[in-house]
Image: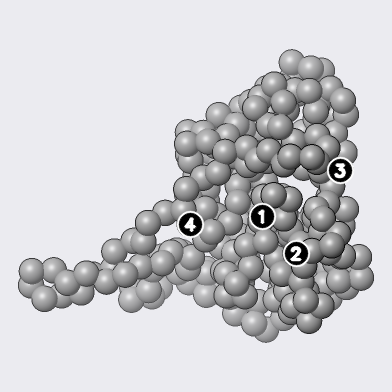
């Protein structure tokens, strides 16, 4: 808990510009280049490229988990909320050598456009979680399609692709209509999950950790959320627990392809 709290505080200090000798973005990786005057300046490392929509041969249109015979799981995060908490969480994952999948909400990307590149530059994966996080399975076809396509447009403008995955908002499973509309928008699969952390209810870090580790299995796709301090605090012990079981956290595309 103290480690995660410190990470949150550090991320906040960086955003506020309190440490001029460190990069503003805790996930940025830099080399150093000498100027003609002999001074050393940080030079951003090449950015990770955005992935196009993933096509997993032999898997169903709606994917809830990956192979049960491997040694990997996918931690997937609904992308919305305080960007300081989001950066802290991504930093925790990177310190542990983990890679995650962020399903971003379009209006969050409008408010926090730099987060798209922050996710990708950390080696993570970015996808579509609708434009406004409405109950997409209850919407008429035209409105549901607009929710998917508008977020896809935001992702394309920011990264060059519509993202690796589409996940329906306010629903674990997509209806047949939403599945068809997602395919129309360019997503071969709908991404579901088999483990719900219930972290959005803010039960506290120990409860989130217990829920995930009690339910996870090889191949699991775990549903988590950005923007919750308890999730940031829970992530290091979750990753430790996975490692003790011989499991590693990878992107969803790595899990299923």
Q: What's the mark number on residue 121?
A: 4
Residue shown at 47% from the left, 36% from the top: 160
Quadrant placement of the N terminus: bottom right
- Outermost residue to the left: 37
Q: Relative to the observer, which residue lies in front, 91 or 20? A: 91
* Disc 3 target residue: 172
Q: Residues within 10 Å of mark 4 (few under 14, many from 20)?
A: some
Whether tag 3 and tag 1 are in contact, CB under 8 A, the answer is no
> Where residue 115 appears, x then y in whole percent?
52, 51
- Mark 3 or mark 4, earlier in chain: 4
* Disc 1 target residue: 254
| Foreground disc of the pair 4, 1 | 1
Residue shown at 22% from the left, 69% from the top: 33
Q: Residues within 10 Å of mark 3 (few under 14, many from 20)?
A: some
Q: Residues within 10 Å of mark 1 (few under 14, many from 20)?
A: some
Q: What's the mark number on residue 72?
A: 2
- Outermost residue to the right: 214
Q: CA distance from mark 3 to mark 1?
A: 21 Å
> Where residue 233 appears, x then y in whole percent?
71, 73
| Label 4: element kind | helix
Residue shown at 69% from the left, 21% from the top: 184
| Foreground disc of the pair 3, 1 | 1
On the rendered structure, is 110 left or right of 168? left
- Mark 2 or mark 1, earlier in chain: 2
Whether tag 2 and tag 1 are in contact, CB under 8 A, the answer is yes
Q: CA distance from mark 4 to mark 2?
A: 22 Å
> Where residue 127 appears, x then y in whole percent?
64, 43
Whether tag 4 and tag 2 are in contact, CB under 8 A, the answer is no
Q: CA distance from mark 2 to mark 3?
A: 21 Å
């Amino acid at each position: 808990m103290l480690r995660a709290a410190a990470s949150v505080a550090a991320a906040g200090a960086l955003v506020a510009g309190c440490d001029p000798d460190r990069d503003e973005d805790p996930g940025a990786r830099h080399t150093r280049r000498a100027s003609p005057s002999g001074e050393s300046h940080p030079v951003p490392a090449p950015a990770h490229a955005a992935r196009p929509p993933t096509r997993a041969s032999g898997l169903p249109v709606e994917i809830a988990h990956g192979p049960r015979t491997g040694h990997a799981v996918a931690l997937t995060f609904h992308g919305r909320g305080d960007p300081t908490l989001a950066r802290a969480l991504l930093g925790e994952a990177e310190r542990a050598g983990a890679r995650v999948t962020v399903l971003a909400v379009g209006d969050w990307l409008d408010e926090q456009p730099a987060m798209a590149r922050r996710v990708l530059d950390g080696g993570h994966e970015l996808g579509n979680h609708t434009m406004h996080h409405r109950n997409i399975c209850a919407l008429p076809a035209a409105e549901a399609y607009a929710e998917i396509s508008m977020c896809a447009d935001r992702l394309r403008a920011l990264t060059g692709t519509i993202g690796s995955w589409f996940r329906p908002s306010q629903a674990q499973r997509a209806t047949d209509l939403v599945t068809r509309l997602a395919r129309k928008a360019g997503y071969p699969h709908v991404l579901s999950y088999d483990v719900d952390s219930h972290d959005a209810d803010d039960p506290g870090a120990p409860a989130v950790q217990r829920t995930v580790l009690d339910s996870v299995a090889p191949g699991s796709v775990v549903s988590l959320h950005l923007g919750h301090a308890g999730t940031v605090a829970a992530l290091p012990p979750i990753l430790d627990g996975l490692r003790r079981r011989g499991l590693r956290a990878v992107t969803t595309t790595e899990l299923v392809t």
